[in-house]
Amino acid sequence: MTEFIMYHYVRDLKNSNYPKIKGLDIKNFESQLNYLSKNYNVISIEEFYNKKFCSDKKSCVLTFDDGYIDHYEFVLDKLLKYKMKGAFYIPVDVIDHNKVLDVNKIHLILASASEDLILSRIKHHFSKTQSEKSIDHYIKKVDLTHRYDTKKTVVIKRLLQTVLDLDIRNFICDKLIEDFLFKSEKELSSELYLNRNHITEMIDYGMHFGSHGKSHFWFDSLNFDQQEFEIKESIKFLNSLYKKSDYLLSMSYPYGNYNDDTLKLMKKYEFKLGLTIVPEIYNSQKDDFFTIPRLDTNDYSQYY
């Protein structure tokens, strides 16, 4: 049994430019590492794959999604202090094309205004589109179940992530950024994400980097060819980062989302591991290497 722990934002929340973004404060992160160091065998993802770890003690793998600058400025030093390795998953577009992920645009918007005001502006901007259907039609399609978010936040996220058509949600997201943030996408990208120099240094320290797609799309919203393009571009990106050709090829599915086409492509391109966001502990008796579950850092909140 191995616990995969999933992190996203890890930062000095009090002094952050966006303190309302839900993240793990660096002090709490270190408290977690301290607890894990005393109670777990914290292993690298390569050690997990090659089964090079002690099986009579609880083990865990630390994973970090989306390629935030936090992972260099705050996480790296703490991992080195505790002699731990992390697995980091980055979408290509945030590094090579100065894009801001939709999920991060939404987080920034939610951190900058009230839910009611955001919903009001979404409805206003939606009314300027050529959609034949009403915004209420799309709101009714939203699955409101979520482990942490309020129902209004779930509606905002799902409308801007998947429920609205791509062109419409891109238009609305950009308008909301103008409404609340007053910065260009390039400026926001440089604030949020790692660059290639950071990544090279982290690899030199023994950190693992894997695929998180090219554009961080929900894979089950893409057809086979579109998924293949996302995956091939991410492999090309990883090949450009590593100085060796025999690195472990792994993927964290964007949003934890995948389908049968994804799994076929994982095998075609010789991925070794695929990580989901199913909140369970990995059990080799029932889980395979392409559907590895992960617990959220919030599941360990009692340890800080």
Image (spheres, rainbow, N blue to C red):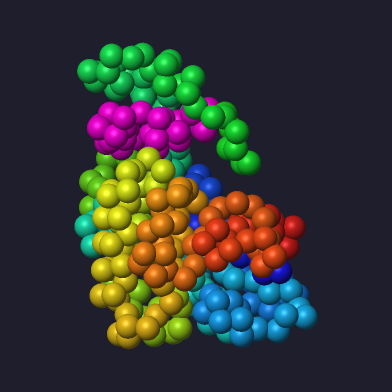
Asked if residue 291 is positioned above or below residue 157 in the image, the reply reads: below
Q: What predominant SS class does the magenta segment belong to?
A: helix
Q: Is residue 9 depicted above or below 169 in this figure?
A: below
**Residue at (23% x, 52% y) in the render:** 186
Residue 130 image point, x, y percent: 22, 18
Magenta-drawn segment: 152-180
Percent position of residue 143, x then y? 54, 29
The N terminus appears in which quarter of the rendering? bottom right
Q: Which of 130 and 18 is in front in this view?
A: 130
Residue 18 in the image, given as x and y percentages of width and height: 44, 48
Quarter of image, res 57: bottom right
Label total for image = 0
**Quarter location, residue 119:** top left
Magenta stretch: includes residue 21: no
Camera sees residue 25? no
In the shown orientation, is residue 301 left or right of residue 290?
A: right
Report the residue at 32% width, 85% height from top: 244
Left or right of residue 132, residue 261 in this image? right
Of residues 189 and 293, which is closer to you in this image?
293
Is residue 247 visible in the rendered structure shown here? yes
Quadrant housing residue 103: top left
Q: Residue at x 67, y 55 (%)?
A: 280
Image quarter where the C terminus lies is bottom right
Asked if 182 appears above or below 201 in the picture, the reply is above
Q: In the rendered structure, does residue 165 fall within the stretch colored magenta?
A: yes
